[in-house]
Amino acid sequence: MGKVLAICQMGGEFIQNKDGTLTYSGGEAHAVDIERDMALDELRNEISGMFNCNMEAYSIKYFLPNNKKTAITVSNDKDLKRMVDFHANSDTTDIYIMKKAENRVIRSVVADSDTTTDMTTTTLATVDGSSKRRRVSVDWANLITGVGQVFESPKAFRDTLHKYAVANKFTYKFVKNDTTRVTAECTAEDCPWRIHASKSPAKKEFMIKKMSDEHTCGKEMKRGHRLASQRWVASVIKEKLRDSPNYKPKDIATDLEKEYGLSLNYSQAWRGKFIAKKELYNSLEEASGQLPWFISRIHETNPGSIATMDAPEGSKCRFFVAFRASLEGFEHGCRPLLFLDAITSKSTRHWRLLVATAVDGEGEIFPVAFAVVENDSLENWRWFLEQLKSTLSSSRAITFVCNGQNGLLEEIPLVFEEYGYPGYCVNQLIEDFTAQLDEEWTQEVKNDMVDHLRHAIYALKAEEFNQCLDNIKAQSEEVYQWLMETKPERWSDAYFKGLRYGQYSSNAVEIFTDWVSTRYELSVVQMVDLVRCKIMEMMYTRRETSNGWTDLLTPSANRKVQEHMNRARTLDVVCSAGDVFEVRDDSVNNVVNVETWECSCRRWQVDGLPCMHALAVFERTDRGVYDYCSKYFTAECYRLAYSSSINPIPDVGQPIACSSELIHSSVTPPTRTRRMAGRPKEKPADPRISIKRSNRCSKCKVYGHNKATCKMPAQMDI
């Protein structure tokens, strides 16, 4: 009870099976007992001693019961307790010690063949401990060892042969190439190099049967390499192009020379970049084909969910999703507070993820709705808010908190009218305020100004707020005027019109960015389904955790009440008739109205939990503390937020056959046209300022034509 035997594994690798589950192979293992109240630092110290490693560079992961597809990271003490709770009914559990910055090899079994491929790139090694990079292709030079070498399939053999030829600087052609045999020979005339591999009738293995490993061609590369095709170059540079969209062809050629020993001309590098860009940015056609099908699957598997798309003229399509479980959880279990954020990551650079997240009783984010759009323009935000408004069933007032950019704060009341209160994200406000400070000021003065702003934000009364702003005004009139233009009623507790319940900012950006950050380019469908899986797992984890709570309030709310209660016992309460009381706090008299849930200090009204003055009254009059806490902090309300589940969509990622009627009802896909020969002409940034170069004839020296079209009679030689 409250204890689990953990098998700590380190130094191995994950193998991805055909069904998507992960299996850990290799490495070494040690056993350790983990108590429920054990601190994460204590566990890390014990693991560090067992494996003789510095745990600062490692993370701890584990699998949920009956879920071997997603590894959960243990980041804090609370995560460690959850892990013990999840495996309370198991004799043992496996935990994996993974290096944070390491590109581990994850082997993936391809579903349509028996091929096993390595899903990682070859790491650039160092030579003799120096920082000089070693060519990637050096590791490929000995991939083919000779007769008797076995491969999983003909495709695996062809892939290996390609790398081998690149590393050894020769080209080959296929003499025979089918599912049972592959024969290749060097393209150089009279060169005897030849290789033949075929499938063994007995063992069904694909094996090299004959090989003449002698080259008489010298294996010298001149300009380029026939194996460095456009698509091969595209596959090599795609990752770099995603991170650096302005990756120049001449830099591509230089890098390929350094890393692969290939000498490409500008045209080859440019065409490889063109194909890579096309593969990276081909999301519109995908959206026109897959998204309508995906929308129908969301409606079928999760009835009551909202999924819709829109294709504005001249822009990419927009895709909005709100699952029924999220909508019901927000409606019945979360405070009426939504944070609006735009998320971008390296793997989704062409798209923005607009998200609306609520806050549960533990102060953690609760995703309500999200949309995939081309950019976070005001037009896209307006469309997102309109979709969000149509999905919310109740007409309760909602406070919206955002970073204030793109005019979003002004747009909220226009869409939600009297039911929407705009709020300025406190972290963004402080960042914007800091940018307004004079660079010539000392760091001490800047820190004092930021402190004045923080006190103004959390000031509960107008007098306290005005005092903080006077301090800012005394230092700089310009900064004061800028701050007043941000409208204090959007960020100061003293004047705020909505309800934030003590929640001033959100970490939704960090969480969503971590969710969608992958090494590979994600399609819209893949990204949306990845977010769905993360939300589904999050709801399951928190629902299971809350089942073990015994208090009426959530753990974090209960801690706050207990902290206030300790101070409340030192206060003097003056009783009177009715529900109004006077509480003395450091020579300040505070008036508590139990019936209206109000205190003159305003802490009760702002946070939603009784302040220490109200708790002093409850202690004196034997009233129940939990009867005067906002329902959003109760364990019952927390469980309601996570009572529903998001259902799996099992066939996402499989080939689909959308009917033409379904596709054309939403978006017409772009028409494919045959690309003309040569480099496509690119339009200038502004056609109005384009300059047409005038030709000059080399015969008559007149502008406007060339020598071939010159009408001047040719002079006769004397």
Image (cartoon, rainbow, N blue to C red):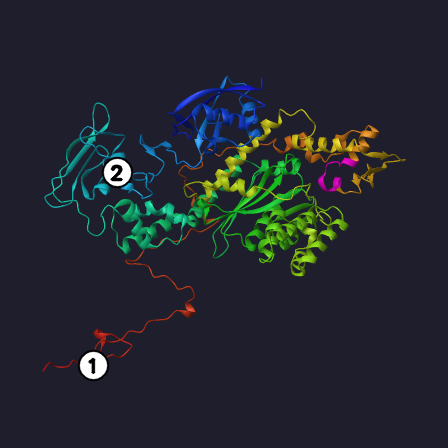
Quadrant of the drawing holding the C terminus: bottom left
Which secondary structure, mark 2? helix
Which numbered tag is attached to residue 232?
Answer: none
> Which label number is shown at residue 712?
1
Q: Whole-Å distance between the Cαs marked 1 and 2? A: 62 Å
Q: Is residue 108 above or below residue 136?
A: above
In the drawing, does residue 6 fall left or right of residue 194? right
SS under mark 1: loop
Highlighted range, magenta:
603-613
Give the image location of residue 693, x and y in percent: 33, 71
For the point 54% across and 28% down, which residue is it?
40
Q: Quadrant of residue 202?
A: top left
Q: How many marks?
A: 2
Considering the image in quadrants, where does the N terminus appear? top right
**Disc 2 residue type?**
Trp
Q: Name which of mark 1 and mark 2 comes first in the sequence.
A: 2
Residue 605 covered by magenta stretch: yes
Tell me the amino acid under the disc marked 1: Met
Q: Is residue 34 magenta?
A: no
| Residue under label 2 | 140
